[in-house]
Amino acid sequence: MVEETTAPTVDQHNSFKASCTLNEKEAGPSDPQPMPNASKECQLFLTDLVNGGDVLVAIDRAYMDCVPTDTVYGIPLGEENVQVTITLPKLKRTLLPIPTNEATCIEEAVGGFVAWGKRLVVIQTSLSQASQGPNHATDREAEGSKQTKKRARKKRIQSQPEVQQ
């Protein structure tokens, strides 16, 4: 007997070990896959504690209809987190904000479910943003870039030797 397999669509992601749950609105016993509109394309950020600001670390899909009792690897999401799947890592070796037994960095989480803080998830709202691709700078990225440039300029100014007359 030959099993038929189909490639997953954007909204059909497999958990690493089937240890994630979706709420009943999205998946029930007769409908094991999420509804087509259950997830939204988004950008994932992490706070840069050294330089300040938020840094874009991945592009993915967020399941915004999750409830606090939904779980990712047996751990409830809680009020402050959302379930996401990572599809395009930008900084692969960056540690996950909420690591699991199966994944501790972004690269290891590609294609599986992870929890992410809601305040660090930016939903793609316009077609023009999405079509400009991953190199399109968002307001968050631009602000972080301005801060980084300002710090670098200060460092350069401070590091110049004084000229004695």
Image (cartoon, rainbow, N blue to C red):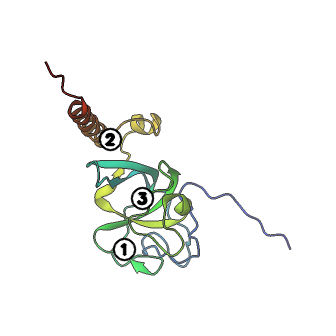
Say above or below: 130 vs 11. above
Can you identify the residue that label 3 sits on?
62
In the depicted view, which residue is nearer to us: 138 or 39?
138
Q: Is residue 77 left or right of residue 53?
A: right
In the depicted view, which residue is nearer to us: 113 or 11?
113
Q: Position of residue 121 (x, y in %)?
A: 34, 55
Q: How many angstroms separate mark 3 from mark 2 (CA)?
A: 19 Å
**Figure quadrant of the C terminus:** top left
Q: Position of residue 162 (x, y in %)?
A: 18, 27
In the depicted view, which residue is nearer to us: 162 or 156?
162
Q: How many angstroms separate mark 2 from mark 1 (CA)?
A: 27 Å
CB-based contact (under 8 Å), mark 1 and mark 3:
no
- N-term-proximal mark, 2 vs 1: 1
Q: Which amino acid type is shown beneath numbered disc 2?
A: Glu
Q: Secondary structure at mark 3?
A: strand
Can you identify the residue that label 1 sits on?
77
Q: Position of residue 110 (x, y in %)?
A: 55, 59
Say above or below: 138 vs 99. above
- N-term-proximal mark, 3 vs 2: 3
Q: Which amino acid type is shown beneath numbered disc 3?
A: Ala
Q: Which amino acid type is shown beneath numbered disc 1?
A: Leu
- N-term-proximal mark, 1 vs 3: 3
For the point 46% across and 35% down, the residue is 131
Q: Mark 3, mark 2: which one is toward the viewer?
A: 2
Q: Secondary structure at mark 2?
A: helix
Q: Is residue 99 left or right of residue 19?
A: left
Q: Residue furthest left?
A: 165
Q: Is residue 105 left or right of residue 154?
A: right
Can you identify the residue that label 2 sits on?
141
